[in-house]
Image: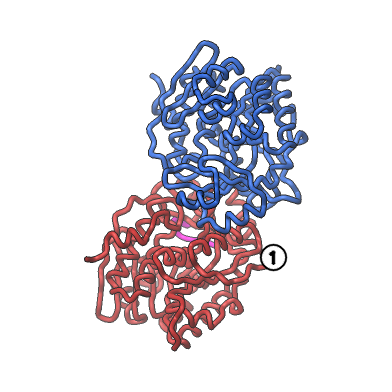
Chain colours: A red, B blue
Amino acid sequence: MTLPSLDILGIGNAIVDVLAPTDETFLQVRNLPKGGMQLIDAAAAEALYGAMPAGVESSGGSAANTCAVAAGLGARVGFLGKVAADQLGQVFTHDIRAAGVAYPTPPLASGAPTARCLILVTPDGQRTMNTFLGACVTFGVADVDPAEVARAKVVYLEGYLFDPPEAQAAFRAAASAAHGAGRKVALTLSDPFCVGRHRAAFLAFVQQETDILFANEAEITALYETDDFEQAAARAVQDVEIAVLTRSEHGSVILSGAARHAIAAQPAKVVDTTGAGDAYAAGFLAAWAQDLPLAEAGRWGSVAAAEVISHYGARPQASLKALVAAGAPA
Amino acid sequence: MTLPSLDILGIGNAIVDVLAPTDETFLQVRNLPKGGMQLIDAAAAEALYGAMPAGVESSGGSAANTCAVAAGLGARVGFLGKVAADQLGQVFTHDIRAAGVAYPTPPLASGAPTARCLILVTPDGQRTMNTFLGACVTFGVADVDPAEVARAKVVYLEGYLFDPPEAQAAFRAAASAAHGAGRKVALTLSDPFCVGRHRAAFLAFVQQETDILFANEAEITALYETDDFEQAAARAVQDVEIAVLTRSEHGSVILSGAARHAIAAQPAKVVDTTGAGDAYAAGFLAAWAQDLPLAEAGRWGSVAAAEVISHYGARPQASLKALVAAGAPA
């Protein structure tokens, strides 16, 4: 086993977010699943965009957000994901590289445009996401270089990739390359609806390939088909080495074997919850990659999530390094 | 003279802003004119974008911002300006229409891309703008329908249009159409550097064609080549019917004939001054179009400017109608 030259290699959808404020009625009349993510096709994306208020564009994508935040915390990070050779693809590429993340995936030369996620933010700060995957659906096994995976301490996979079939295959190839090189595989379940669409495949992947599992309460209970969080948590810790379970304002719970760490949420005025889970995972993994204790990794996650929900958009606007250092144990 | 069906028709550059935070050193080493706007070509834009941190994209353009804000205040507004038929052009078009502004200009089918402004925001909230005009330079006389101009109570022209020669001609055609229909012509000087580049042409246009002039302290003193604000103000009120002069945290002064109204700045925590002048002009014109007194128009301008500088980006995030109503005279 050679020394890893990356801490984290993220694999996920390469997406540009379009954020706009809406009221509850806007969601209701269109039957949009509040707080969740739905996939939409090009025509539906055009229709929804036409009806939306003026927006703000910024780079998004779940694992990509995690990578950008982790790099901001000092981790050495790479990302794999597919944009098109268009203006939004240039924006995504610029932003993730400007965040200090290595991003080698070549853009799709022709065909579908860069993916976008139309995110409607209601007055309570909840975000409802409508994703047109565009070029992302062409991400496949050929885009995963096993040597690149082997270079990283952990490969971090976003559950949303279970939607495009080509990406699912890439996902398994990455996990296999990681374990072949003695590295860890981390998975985030991403979304309860996505878990529902692919429950059996998710469960098999968690049990067979996942070392570090990230999920929120809705996702972990969906995975184990129970209404009871504690029951789901008990199942998770049997299936993976480390289960990291987030519970919004109730903080998070980190389980590993017999150890259980309850982490308080950091205080924050919620403006927009977009990217909260992504930022939490970033903080956790950046600390984990430095071999910090699990409870401290959870604190880093909570600090990163609190920063990201305090403003519009999924990527930090303040120095997370400084915020994390400010609350570090003496 | 038929009854106008628009309050304000804005004419300006159709631009997508890319905002990113930087430190002072970033500006200094690149010799960027802090607080001002410089024009850059495609190659310089690519180089600067490559060096910039991750950004946030949103629709901009000085007159376009004014139009969007004025529509939010209830004015009936149209905008003329040129985007390309590309993704950023779609973003600009969506956003200005979503703001309730009529936007009839057809996009440029091929050639230059949609204009973008790379805006660097320093920790003091000052913005330094670097504009690649792209498709905007093709905006010309053919894009100005005199009937459209004649429909509006006032045509509002942004001084930045003095940079592309084709647009200058369009500018004069619009002023001529407005006056021919008995309407008013408003001009914003936009930028002291732009005034410096075209001082004689600006002065002639102010004296011969302008009814309502918007300028900040740096711009009005540049126009009249004096260091003394009061001297410049005295000159301005001789040249135009209404001179609206903004002075950042010192508020604004509205001069018309012998009348002089000093308007206090609204309290605001400055995060990003991008669009402050645009929002002020919007508030002023939206109130003026309702025949409100000049002092009240100034208050509307101050309220709109205070909202816009309190967050990142040039367009409002709160209901300006509510903010304006909250402080209305009994």
| In this picture, residue B300 sits left or right of residue B162 | left
Q: Residues within 10 Å of mark 1 (few under 14, many from 20)?
A: few
Residue A133 % position (x, y): 58, 64
Residue A193 shown in magenta: no
What residue is shown with label 1?
A111
Q: Amino acid at mark 1?
A: Gly
* Vertical side of A318 occupied by B217: above or below: above
In depth, the one of B150 and B299 nearer the eye is B299
In depth, the one of A33 and B296 nearer the eye is B296
One can see residue A250 in this view: no
- Range of residues picked out in magenta: A33-39
Task: Check the picture and name the quadrant holding the C terminus of chain A.
Answer: bottom left
- The image quadrant that residue A258 belongs to is bottom left
- Chain letter of disc 1? A
Task: Check the picture and name the quadrant holding the N terminus of chain A.
Answer: bottom left
Residue A305 % position (x, y): 37, 60
Residue A152 % position (x, y): 46, 78
Residue A37 shown in magenta: yes
Q: Find numbered disc 1 in the image and state the secondary structure of the residue it sits on.
A: loop
- Measuring 55% from the left and 48% from the top, which residue is drawn there? B31
One can see residue A197 in this view: yes
* Vertical side of B325 occupied by A265: above or below: below
- Measuring 47% from the left and 88% from the top, which residue is drawn there? A180
- The image quadrant that residue B306 belongs to is top left
* Number of marks in the rendered image: 1
In depth, the one of A109 and B27 nearer the eye is B27
* Vertical side of A96 occupied by B6: above or below: above
Residue B150 % position (x, y): 70, 24
Q: Residue furthest right?
A: B142
